[in-house]
Amino acid sequence: MKPPGLVVASCIAALVYVGVLATQTPPPPMQAIEPFSLPERPVALTEDMVTRFLYGFAPVAAKVREIDGRGEAAQRTAALDQTAAKYGFSSFADWMNTTNTIMVTYHWATNPDPRLEVEKAIEAIPAMSNLNDQEKADMISGLKAGLARVESAKPMPENLAIVQRHLRTLKPFYELWAPPGQ
């Protein structure tokens, strides 16, 4: 198991890497959980929302796999909206915002001090002999930008309290969002 600091730094580095890739490659296949994604707009969580997320995850994920790349975008959206609605979400976008809010909140609940962890990671970069000076500077810059994004996504205390009651149950979903080893 990685130390929490390495997980935080890995998550931030992955956010930066995903941001760079998004400008260079075609979109990846649809997923029920987009790794390291922040919510478009954070959701004020309730116990009921977390429960609906847990019960709805398998059917929504199955629908995502079923329709990936098939039909028109509007048809895929309608099918996903319909599946999400079965679990009380207004749309698939609402489901994704809730999912990402839960994942970010879980991350903060289990890694409450990202600044300290990123500072440790930044301190280690100059000693990385496999990187040239520009790569080191880019990595440091990316970590700082990623930290700013993560800090701006700090969840509301009410969301933390709700998610903390579900840490054990949410862990497998979090591992889809922040895959171990990345």
Image: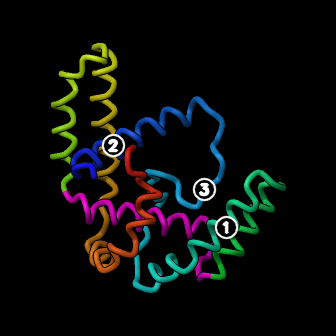
The residue that label 1 is drawn on is 62
The residue that label 2 is drawn on is 10
Image location of residue 28, percent across then percent down: 63, 44
Image location of residue 113, percent across then percent down: 18, 54
Instruction: State the image quarter where residue 75 is shown.
Output: bottom right
Q: Secondary structure at mark 3?
A: loop
Q: Secondary structure at mark 2?
A: helix
Q: In the rendered image, which quarter contains the C terminus?
A: top left
Along the polypeptide, which appears first: circle 2 or circle 1?
2
Please rate how many residues cluster around mark 1, counting C-alpha atoms within 10 Å: few if below 14, some from 14 to 19, many from 20: few
Image location of residue 114, percent across then percent down: 22, 50
As displayed, is residue 124 above or below residue 153?
A: above
Question: What is the three-letter code of the residue carrying label 3?
Answer: Gln
Question: What is the three-letter code of the residue carrying label 2?
Answer: Ser
Helix, strand or loop: magenta stretch: helix
Tell me where the magenta segment starts and ends, as one range: 87-112
Question: What is the three-letter code of the residue carrying label 1?
Answer: Ala
Instruction: Name which residue lies at 42% across and 59% down.
Output: 175
Please rate how many residues cluster around mark 2, counting C-alpha atoms within 10 Å: few if below 14, some from 14 to 19, many from 20: many
Quick one: 168 or 164, which is closer to the camera? Answer: 168
Distance from the alpha carbon under mark 3 to that under mark 1: 10 Å
Distance from the alpha carbon under mark 2 to that under mark 1: 28 Å
Along the polypeptide, which appears first: circle 3 or circle 1?
3
Q: Nearer the viewer, mark 3 or mark 1?
A: 1
Q: Is residue 107 magenta?
A: yes
Q: Which mark is residue 31?
A: 3
